């Protein structure tokens, strides 16, 4: 059996999050928390989800990203916030530097 790399703690249930071929999964099979490597939210802002980004998200609940791309092709810096839906699925939101509260 391949060795599983523990990457952090699940923000939904507190179990370990392990890296697999297609993403980062909660080790608790009844929890639905997954961060897919081929992540639509990150593709939309011109980024790829990496192990270091996932480690920051799991540790701090947010990660600071530079040079994200808008739909109109402009670049911006933002903080990506990670939260959990009530069913355990991951949810992302953006917080902008000059965006008030």
Image: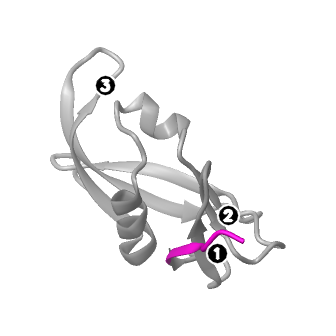
Q: Is residue 94 left or right of residue 4?
A: left
Q: Which residue is mark 3?
A: 70
**Quick check: 82 above or below 6?**
above
Quadrant placement of the N terminus: bottom right
Decide: few, some or many residues near mark 3? Use Cα within 10 Å; few <14, some 14-19, many ≥20. few
Is the Cβ of the residue at disc 1 closer than 8 Å to that at disc 2?
yes
The image position of residue 84, as x and y in percent, is 61, 64
List the single residue furthest toward the right: 30
| Image coords of residue 4 (percent x, y) | 60, 73
Residue at 25%, 47% in the rendered image: 78
Q: Is residue 28 left or right of residue 50?
A: right
Q: Residue at x 65, y 69 (%)?
A: 2
Q: Is residue 77 positioned above or below 20 on the image?
A: above
**What residue range appears in magenta?**
1-7
- Crowd tier of the residue under label 2, counting other residues whose Cα lies within 10 Å: few below 14, some 14–19, many 20 or above: many
Determine the image quadrant of residue 88.
Answer: bottom right
Give the color scheme: rainbow, by chain, secondary structure or one colour: one colour
Camera-near label (1 vs 2) is 2
């Amino acid at each position: 059996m391949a060795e599983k790399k523990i990457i952090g703690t699940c923000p939904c249930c507190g179990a370990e999050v392990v890296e697999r071929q297609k993403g980062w999964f909660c080790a608790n099979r009844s929890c639905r928390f997954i961060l897919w490597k081929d992540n639509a939210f990150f593709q939309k802002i011109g980024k790829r989800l990496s192990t270091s980004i996932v480690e920051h998200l799991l540790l701090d609940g947010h990660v600071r990203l530079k040079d994200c791309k808008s739909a109109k092709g402009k670049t911006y810096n933002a903080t990506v916030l990670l939260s959990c839906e009530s069913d355990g699925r991951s949810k992302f939101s953006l917080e902008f530097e000059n965006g008030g509260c």
